Amino acid sequence: MEVMIILVPLALALGLAGLVGFLWSLKSGQYEDLEGAAWRAIADDDEPVAPVQPEAAPSRP
Amino acid sequence: MQVTRDFSHYVKDLGAGLKHIDLAVEGVSCAGCMAKIERGLSALPDVTLARVNLTDRRVALEWKQGTLDPAKFIDRLAELGYKAYPFEKASAETTEAEESRFLLRCLGVAAFATMNVMMLSVPVWSGNVSDMLPEQRDFFHWLSAVIALPAVAYAGQPFFRSAWRALKTGNVNMDVPICIGVILALGMSIVETFHHAEHAYFDAAIMLLTFLLVGRYLDQNMRRRTRAVAGNLAALKAETATKFVGPDEISEVPVAAVRAGDLVLLRPGERCAVDGVVIEGRSEIDQSLITGETLYVPAEQGTAVYAGSLNISGTLRVRVSAAAEGTLLAEITRLLDNALQARSRYMRLADRASRLYAPVVHATAALTVLGWVLAGAGWHDAIVTGIAVLIITCPCALGLAIPTVQTVASGAMFKSGVLLNAGDAIERLAEADHVIFDKTGTLTLPELEVVNAADIPADVFALAGQLALSSHHPVAAAVAQAAQARSPLMGATEEPGQGVRAVVDGVEIRLGRPAFCGAEALVAQNGNVDPEASVVAFRRGTETFLFSVRQGLRPDADKIIAGLQRRGIKVEILSGDREAAVAAAAKALGIGEWRAGVTPADKIARIEQLKRSGVKVMMVGDGMNDAPALAAAHVSMSPISAAHLSQATADLVFLGRPLAPVLAAIDYARKALHLMRQNLWLAVGYNVLAVPLAISGVVTPLIAAAAMSGSSILVMLNALRARKVAGEATSWKS
């Protein structure tokens, strides 16, 4: 049963890592716009979304 | 005169040379819009962040302080095809968002703890029947305690706080038995673990909190979402005023930036956004949103105007007065205060249930302890069994029974165009059996429309519409709208207070007062058949035509009234308008009971009279004069076009042109109340089955956990049925 000495803390540490991850995602506002996030995942990101020059602005229908 | 737009009120300084503004955007519906807007705005120089929130339909913008004018963003969005308005978060919305985030954090902590405690519990459960060393079991129990105790202390806060608040005022709510159950379960588990006992209930306590937090969070989230939409709609209504910033210079500013003593300009066709006194100019104003009276009132120097009045014909200069200085407004405010005070403190279904539930459960637990002691068991065993009764009856299903139905029902109402202002509105709405409608703006549409369009030749109508585009007069605007005119005529001139004229193909055409068009004979000949309509005349060469313009009934009003009556609900009209106008509307809709020329005080008196005879009154109204009545009624509803005061007072707000949301809301509310009761009975039924097991002392943590999650899931599944109601499901979008 010595294996428990490793496994139990390991399981708890993994769970705790999950919780920390969740709290971080909550704090960084990832639950503010669930509908938008669903679409962003499949949006093309080949074009830069960050500031671009006016003339280079892609215009899409 | 130079008009500038001033948005400085909405701009927030983030420090480090960055500025921030929130815009509410109309018509954002998909990922394409999102990408288009974000790219289009990011392309502007100096913009550092443009992020669309698709759930709330808003854009957050940040840019480097300097030359960029926020008005530029709105213009850019207009180029992209979206209407945008600067937006200020209401304080209620901010606190609600905060609360929602806190609940989610609690839920995260509780769910994490539940998973880990369960991971430790399952080996214990199976170990108890196979082989597990007592030391191992104790180790697992202590480990569970280390996880569960801090998690409950943190994630239980919403329940502890609410229970404490209730107890302080001498009340009992659902959270009191929850807290007692959780605390006793944990306390007993620690004592039992200390004594190397076989059973501990850490898992049950933390799982209970997780389930309940799910219900709480769903409830909160739905309310936050409706509030966000209501906030956007308020921004879209564009509460701006045209303020004089110099003797001859005007600027469009948000109403919040207008102070008493400022001068504002009120052009024809504009709705006044402030209370004040006319200091210059002469016009007619439409005060129907304030008094319900549809006849125009002449306005000149010294006339008091109120927020919500529509300016009809001339330009006015208004000096803004401090709020509630006018007699009418002061009177309404006084009545409203009284009505709000008198509003009976409605006891929510959940609170009524817990008021019955708590004593029964606690008495059962006490009797169990006594019973076992009398039967010869030791005190220790008796108390353990008593606490097992508390744990298994802990109102997991009961706590979910109502919030889940409420969440599902308010989601369904939201889809059919109804926003909830008050948390307990669904229950009160379901009980309503007498609906009182205001006429102007509620049964009728707030906009004007041409009623005799069919009698006028199409080419004449089109020409009149084009000419009407050159006038600011609301009646002319209605003609232009009805004719779907797009291109104004060249060289059209407006004679203030008379009408517009132009020359087309050498023929003079005129639109305006009958006298201006030489159509008095035609008016006399037709008689004034419709007492509510305004008549506007059109002349082309020697031909004359009359347009009859009025506020039309909502397109489906007659069907909805009939639907209400079919459901056994009595319908009545109480209006501040003239008798002839109210009688005509009542006749058209088949409503037998109506009163005209009613003052706000009369409306309250009528509601009180109905209340005394045991009737549950629902008031539907939009005017400022309805606000006290909305507060006095058992439940109340306003269209989104209503005066601010009424909308804030109403329990529910409906969107769009049709009246259908009123009926849909009642249907959904009735179904929801039915399901809430059903869920409560399901929870009671579960207890009837589980409690004898607990009393007989055979409940192990495994049975407690299974029973608790089983009943919670059953109740949640039942709540999903609130999404659909039988019968007419009509959309509010038309």
Image: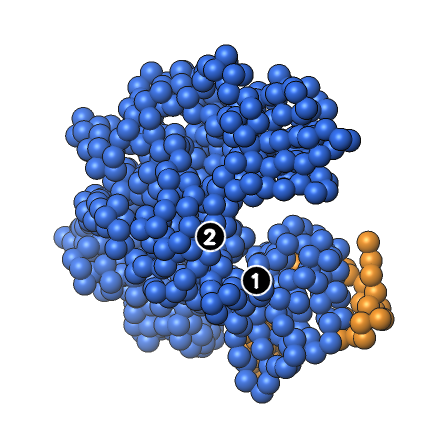
Q: Is residue B589 visible to the viewer in this orientation of the structure?
A: no
In terms of secondary structure, where does tag 2 sit?
strand
Between residue B346 and residue B27, name the one nearer to us: B27
Residue at numbered disc 2: B266
Identified at 39% across, 32% down, the residue is: B294
Task: Where is residue B430? Give x, y as percent.
Answer: 36, 33
Crowding at mark 1 (Cα within 10 Å: few <14, some 14-19, many 20+): few
- Where in the figure is residue B308, as x and y percent of width and height? 41, 47
The colour applied to the residues of chain B in this rendering is: blue
Q: Chain of mark 1?
A: B
Of all chains in the rendering, the one displayed in orange is A
Residue B10 circle label: none
> With B732 as the anchor, is B45 left or right in this view?
right
Inspect the image, locate mark 2, and give the three-letter code of the amino acid beneath it.
Answer: Leu
Residue topped by disc 1:
B1
Q: Quadrant of the C terminus of chain B?
A: top right
